[in-house]
Image (cartoon, coloured by chain):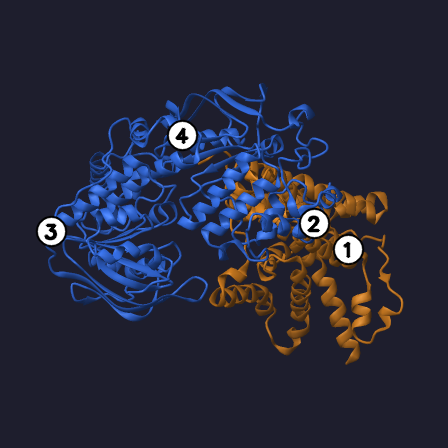
Chain colours: A blue, B orange
Amino acid sequence: MWTMWKAASPNNFNPAAVPGLMRMPKSRGGCPATLMKKIQRLEMEGISKSFHGIHANKEINLSVGSGEILGLLGENGAGKTTLMNILYGLYQPDAGQIKINGRPVRITNPMESILFGIGMVHQHFMLIQNHSVIENIALGYKDTPFFFPKIKIREKVASFSRQFNFTIDLNKKIWQLSAGEQQRVEIIKALLNGADLLILDEPTSVLTPKEIEELIIILRQMKADGHCVIFISHKLDEIMNICDRVVVLQKGSIVGSADTDQTDKKTLARMMVGRDVVFNISKEKLTKGQQILRADQIHVTGDMGLPAVKGVSFDLYENEIFGIAGVAGNGQRELAEAITGIRRIDSGKVTINGKDITNLSPRHIYDHGVSHVPEERIRFGIAPGLLLYDNAILKQHHLKKFSRRYFLKYNDVKTHTQGIVDDFKVLTHSIDNQIRNLSGGNIQKLILGREISEQPRLLVASHPTYGLDVGATEFLRHHLLKLRKQGSAVLLFSEDLEEIFELCDRIAVIFAGEFMGIFDSDDERLCEIGLMMAGSKRI
Amino acid sequence: MEEIIISTLQRAMVAGTPLLLATTGEIICERSGILNLGVEGVMALGAVTAFIVTMTTGSPWLGVLAALAAGMVISVIHAFTSVTLQANQVVSGLALTMLGLGLAGMVGKPYVGKPLTIKMEDITIPVLSDIPYIGKALFSQSPFFFMAVGLALVSWFFLQRTRLGIQIRSTGENPKATETQGVNVFLIRYMSVIIGGGFSALAGAHLSISYSKSWIEGMTAGRGWIAIALTIFALWNPGRAIWAAFLFGGIFVAQYLMQPLGISPNFLAMLPYIATLLILVLISLKDPRKLNAPAMLAAPYKRGER
């Protein structure tokens, strides 16, 4: 197979023009050779799957054909990812079947789906963080030679990525790459395996606007080449822009489907959440109160040992939401961690109500009234294996109301948790459930409930609605505004400009660890926010 | 003086041989994400198997093969509990140690104290073994020595320079991601645990048919635990394990040399563990990423779990 690679001029490689090329000459994993031809049509019929007694998918029927981009739209927890994991062979459906080109197939593991020509880019990238790019590609590439894999596939991978204008140092470790770069590694992996059907799970959630445009160009190119693409998203704009047809999932079932040129955003949004969505939240005018937070010339070092925040100063008042806009990786995470005490501040000073909290422990900072909704909710916001009520009092277990001397008052803890679950509409069948069984949106609702249940002076919210569906997003934003009205201050980090403009009283734009400017939300200069986020303008 | 240096070096190499074999096995196993604390038990079982088979058949190589087979078979238990049943690997590993030690003591009872008359000939490499000081120590040794170094080098090559190696290391780092790339994580882990067990048993065989040429209960004397410490000390790299194992072998020999000087052998017996702790502390302080521990070591992997 390796010699075939060399024979087929790698420089202008077109997967569609040579359909047999990327196939293994003989089947591995027992797939009949007749099924190895290009996917013309893929159908899923009557697929059902449940976890712990909860239906994730209920009798799903869908199909996608060659040259088509199918959108899969739904709120978080609607079952989109589960459905695609079934198609990719990670889960087995409880009922139903998959057909490729009209023939029923059984996909019991990912290798089989790869051999059928299915490729998947997962929302949470399936990359080995401690390994280099080339090692990750060698792991997933089906024709990797046994001996000296890294040396032998390097040239192939390099020319392949050049063709898609991907410039990534193949020797870099994955943890050194930005999210956008990591996604490109994932796409290269899928395309290199000759995927006819590419599944993209929430692909744009981690990308910058420019990277999204590049992704769209790649998808259009794939469509023209006759590939099938399944595009999972909950962003209506993208679905309308990219997809030919859209299927809407709600609570595990299909509630509607439409051609994108015969429908509109409002209809889709209605199908998705089952009711009308208010797209513009109007916030009341409030006069700001006393100063709560003051940050003075903060310097913080990032994970790679380089300065990540370089001399940032700002202040924050009661009844105010202060937004920090910027493209991911420009120091937002480090700044949020520095203020909440997770990361050391190299120099500078942070005060809350005039009291110095610089480099105190996160617990002490919490005791000063600073709550935190962290950016990676599963990694930093919860303990996935613990029950809902354990997670509902993380950071608060030491409070008098939850503990007596050395013992927790579980009755009070459970009452408190049930209160959060009810108030914040967390969907779960019981609070005696491991929190990992909840969907992202419900986990985030519980985290927010926990963080604001004690009426914080300041809430630091990092990308609170990242990856959430329209319904949950609206819900969380309302709660942020409610908190503002009650006299707290909110420091909001977000990449979503719509969110920033809707919620914030003042907006700072961060680029490469520095503020490009701080503005009132009605400042006209904000029309140039795009330029400032890209670092080409400073005010 | 020259005599002492040469004999010390030579004995350090001999003492390091079983450590290197067992460490290489443990590295392969841990690289796939499975912690195997059963090394000590498997080693004892390997020792007794090799001894009995060699004594009854008269062929040390048959003894070695039998030990290898015994080590691999008993390791299937650990693979089954930790991979298939996803049980706690520490508990399962400790149980394997108890089982191995007990089984070896029981089976070996009739053979205790009997001397082995069949000898394994040393291999002497001409010319190289004439190098002053190190020649004899490095190039005139038992076949086990060459086997240990060879297997460590081959293992390094496999882990770093082959597709299978990438699959094994990826499994230990992130089994879920590895599985989505079409790799059979369960198979890789079974294989790694079984190979690791085979290596431990070889280490035991060296003790009973080459090193002491006899069998008594408890002759492994904690070498299995040192191998586990060495795995960390070598930062999960078989190449580094080579010099580390012989360094620890040197400490073993030093226990006897230093005794007349009034240094307690108990102190020297502690040294391998202290050295391992020191390495852990120093590297963690400097750059934890350099520690290179498999990220998902000892974490059971469940398929289809969200």
**Residue A286: mark:** 3
**Which residue lies under the disc numbered 4?**
A79
Q: Residue at x 61, y 52 (%)?
A: A134
Q: Residue at x 13, y 48 (%)?
A: A485
B179 left or right, relative to B46: left
Find the distance from the CA under tag 3 to the CA under tag 4.
40 Å
Query: Quick check: can you spot residue B301?
Result: no
Compared with B268, B89 (above or below) is above
- Mark 4 lies on a secondary structure that is loop
**Which residue lies under the disc numbered 1?**
B147
Which residue occupies the foreground of this view, A46 or A210? Answer: A210
- Mark 2 lies on a secondary structure that is helix
How many tags in the picture? Answer: 4
Quadrant in which residue A56 is drawn:
top left
Q: Quadrant of the C terminus of chain A?
A: bottom left
Determine if marks 2 and 3 fall on one subunit.
Answer: no
Determine if marks 4 and 2 fall on one subunit.
Answer: no
Q: Nearer the viewer, mark 3 or mark 4?
A: 3
Determine if marks 1 and 4 fall on one subunit.
Answer: no
Find the distance from the CA under tag 2 to the CA under tag 3.
72 Å
Q: Position of residue A166 (x, y in %)?
A: 55, 51
Find out whether the residues at labels 2 and 3 contact each other: C-beta distance under 8 Å.
Answer: no
Q: Label 4 amino acid? A: Gly
**Which residue lies under the disc numbered 2?**
B199
- Mark 3 lies on a secondary structure that is loop
Q: Label 2 amino acid? A: Phe
Find the distance from the CA under tag 2 to the CA under tag 1.
11 Å
Q: Label 1 amino acid? A: Met
